[in-house]
Image (cartoon, helix red, strand yellow):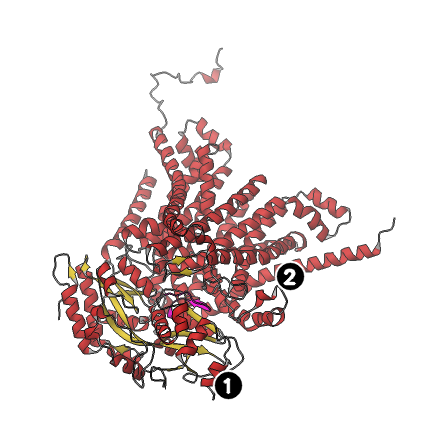
Amino acid sequence: MIRQVRTIGFLALSVMFTCFFHAVFAGDITGAGATFPYPVYAKWAEAYKAKTGISLNYQSIGSGGGIKQIEANTVDFGASDMPLKVEELQKDGLVQWPMVMGGVVPVVNIAGIKKGELKLTGEVLANIYLGTIKKWNDPAIVKINESLKLPDQDIAVVHRSDGSGTTFLFTNYLAKVSKDWMDKAGSNTSVEWPTGIGGKGNEGVANFTAQTPGAIGYVEYAYALQNKLAYTMMANHEGKFVSPLSASFQTAAENADWANAPGFYLVLTDQPGANSWPITGASFILMHKEQAHPDRAKTALTFFSWCFANGSKMAEKLDYIPIPGSVVKIVKSVWLKEIKGKDGNAVYTAE
Amino acid sequence: MKPDPSVLLRRRIVNYCMLVLFTLAIFISIGALTAILWKLSFSGLKAFSPDVFLKSTPAPGSSGGLLNAILGSVILIVTAMVAAIPLGVLAGTYLAEYGRTSRLGDVIRFCNDILLSAPSIVIGLFIYGIIVLPSKHFSAWAGAASLCLIAIPVIVRTSEDMLRLVPNSLREAGVALGCPYWKMIVKIGWKSARPGIITGIILALARISGETAPLLFTSLNNQFTTLSMNVPISSLPIVIFQFAMSPYKDWQNLAWAGAFLITITVLGLSIFARQMLSPKRRS
Amino acid sequence: MVPASGVDKVPAPNEDAEDFHLPSGLHFEGPFKILTRLSAILIIGVMAGIFLLLVLESVPVFHKFGFSFITASSWNPVSNKFGALASIVGTLATSFIAVLFGVPLALGSALFLNELCPFKLRSPLSTMIELLAAIPSIIYGMWGLFVMVPIMSHFIQPAMIKHCGHIPYVGGLFQGPPFGIGTLTAGLILSVMILPFIASVSLQAFATVPASLREAAYGTGANVWEVCRTVLIPFTKASLIGAIMLGLGRALGETMAVTFVIGNAHRLSVSLLAPGTTISATLANEFAEAFGDTYISSLLALGLILFLITFVILMITRMLFLYDKRRIPV
């Protein structure tokens, strides 16, 4: 009898324990998407939690994943470096806005070549990724790098294996500068790569590039910095070779006319300007127009507003470009106008 | 008739070569194990510090620990086992006591064997389809459900095997004394097979502690420590996967520490279980 | 019959005896049986559920692409054209390499432990082999990425390219940049993963060979290898093949170890040194972020194909073991 009571008591305790877990701790705000801005989002989330105690859980699964998860309504917000077109936004009832800007840089792992030494043009880069240029001492590369000693080594091409906005920016640029690339692969978050190995996320590409001798990959600039990878110089729209620095990203971003872009759809690759970095881009946040959980949406928007106001220094330290204040005003007006709860009232209250 | 010396020599040489190859085979096998455990211990212990158990997973470039991952793994495993143990033992009991010769029993045994050896990622796909999609979010419940489905076949199999080992004379003695059949199963069958059943449970526990693939699209991951079951939850294998594939040195170190932790747990449980199981099996 | 003197206190089985009652808990008999039966039927339910889910989700894909889903190698999420060939070939190729290297290692180890091993070492060594089976697959993946890949890319693969790349006909297998990551590396890691399964089952099988047979063979003057060749292996043939199929089944379904080192390239290539993909690696990498009905359905169709392949291998294994009157080891 006592044994039965003990067993039942134990079982009841376990059930209560599990329910307790569920009841007391409500869920955090979850977001998923691009790996491009992940270093800065993670830093912002950490600082915000230290200040307010609210956890923002961001999973960097790639832009493709972010778009999918927000469409399926499994997360509170999605993040993508590939902006959705206005028709796509309307179809799913989403609103998007740029959160931060940065640059995609090619990185190499060649013995003896240090950062900023190797020069590449768009055409050469496209041909490397098409597989038509196979070795580092190919005449096309040697021609633009007379002062460097390039080895007779196979080029190990590294690209993304997952759906990626970084890939979108990279292939968008390649498609603009190389007709062959446009025809053979095109521009999207995931393409049919003619050659190379696939790494998962910006992290995977950085990792494979660092580990494989003779490798070339493309990553968001923060990843190149953090992992001490040798980035290359690129020839921009004016034909000048520029190094990836926040100054060159800034120049490219200056021409961005956000006010006149419906749905904030803007791609910043191959921008004019003597010092512009040719593969610059913005990273976007996606949220639903009609919010089933207005309180969670409000928490998320308050977080984003905090990042706009206080996150610039953290972003710049990682060589991202913060969105200019004038654009932030437009973004906030979009929040007030578009993001509403079921009752029709705007979720966000300007503070 | 004298044996041909050249044939003898050839046989000797062939024998010697094959024996060398066998020895080489065992060397390579044991060598691989040693290499793996060595690298694991070396890199894992290097990264160990009290922080590993005290802090949550960090953003790249910051320091941190594995607290949320460890906690998440424990929650997932405990929830999975709480469901798997009764279901598994009861199903195994059915197979051993009521279903020894029935057609239904044969079909169930067949399905159990399939599930036992099915790729765990397929189990994850199933749970994605029936839990994640309808509920529209990843959750710890989904992760625990997929681990549960991986543990159940192991428990069913070992429970059935252990119950079958209980001699029929014991059963008959119980029934002859007037004991109802079910009570005989519980008080005689389960009691005698208890060490074996518990060993089976430990084996299942060891198996699901190291599983990663089914969690990839059921419980996802979580940067912070959470105790809610209705949201994505962190777990050691997923965190190891994410951190190991990254280029950040501090993340890679944490991945090794986590790997070391998992391996010690799983190996310890497995050694314990198999030691308990083998003398019983032979008896 | 007159009862013996000491047995005149036997109670009569009639309604007057107050201390006779039915055993307690009889009413629970039916519910208990139903409970156990329901738990057992759950197993069938899960298996049927998996099968149904995969088939239902795959039907639109086969409807759209037809049989070309299996024969096309182009996997393009952008144009929504999916072909499973690269994944299927990768799965089969890595498993083939795994069996090619794993079976000799496993059988050699089992034969060593059975015939050559000093008695005292036998138990610890066989436990160590079983420990290889207990190591979680993600550890194999990490070890593969951090230890094997650099060794392959710095030493083994350049040597292969230099020496074997020019051989006519087979040279094509060894060409390309020495990534370190690729089909060959994945196959090698898988072979280490499956060898404990094959070795432990083989060892158990060899233990069933009657001592009289072995001793008779030794008695006629056979040396160790000849005993293995003529007695041990033929006697346990069915179990050995079953063990190999068991290992093959594991290799086909393995996810984590392969995902780390396969290179994620949806391309068919002749070279073993080239990156590729397997069905489970594709699922692991792409499922969480696949969007669009066709994409998700294609991935689930891949899951169905994998499930069917492992199902067939399991059926064959089961038949082989039933022949030997044992069940597939856990």
Locate residue A224: give its quadrant.
Answer: bottom left
Judge if badges 1 and 2 mark residues of a common chain.
no
Locate residue C208: give its quadrant.
Answer: top right
Task: Decide which of B76, C171 is in the foreground and name it.
Answer: C171
Q: Residues within 10 Å of mark 1 (few under 14, many from 20)?
A: few
Q: Quadrant of the N terminus of chain A?
A: top left
Locate residue A287: give its quadrant.
Answer: bottom left
Q: Secondary structure at mark 2?
A: helix
How far apart are the two marked residues, 1 and 2, measured between alpha carbons?
Answer: 45 Å
Point 39% across, 29% down: residue:
B180
Relative side of C303 to A264, left or right: right
Instruction: Measuring from the top left, give residue A194's x and y in whole percent.
Output: 45, 67
- The residue tagged 1 is A149
Three-letter code for the amino acid on which mark 2 is drawn: Leu
Point 46% across, 17% down: residue:
C7
Q: Are marks 1 and 2 in contact (CB under 8 Å)?
A: no
Q: Chain of mark 1?
A: A
Q: Which residues are magenta?
A: A190-202
Disc sitting over residue B24 in the figure = 2
Q: Quadrant of the C terminus of chain A?
A: bottom left
Dominant secondary structure of the residues highlighted in magenta in the image: loop
Q: Chain of mark 2?
A: B
Point 42% across, 33% down: residue:
B184
Three-letter code for the amino acid on which mark 1 is drawn: Lys
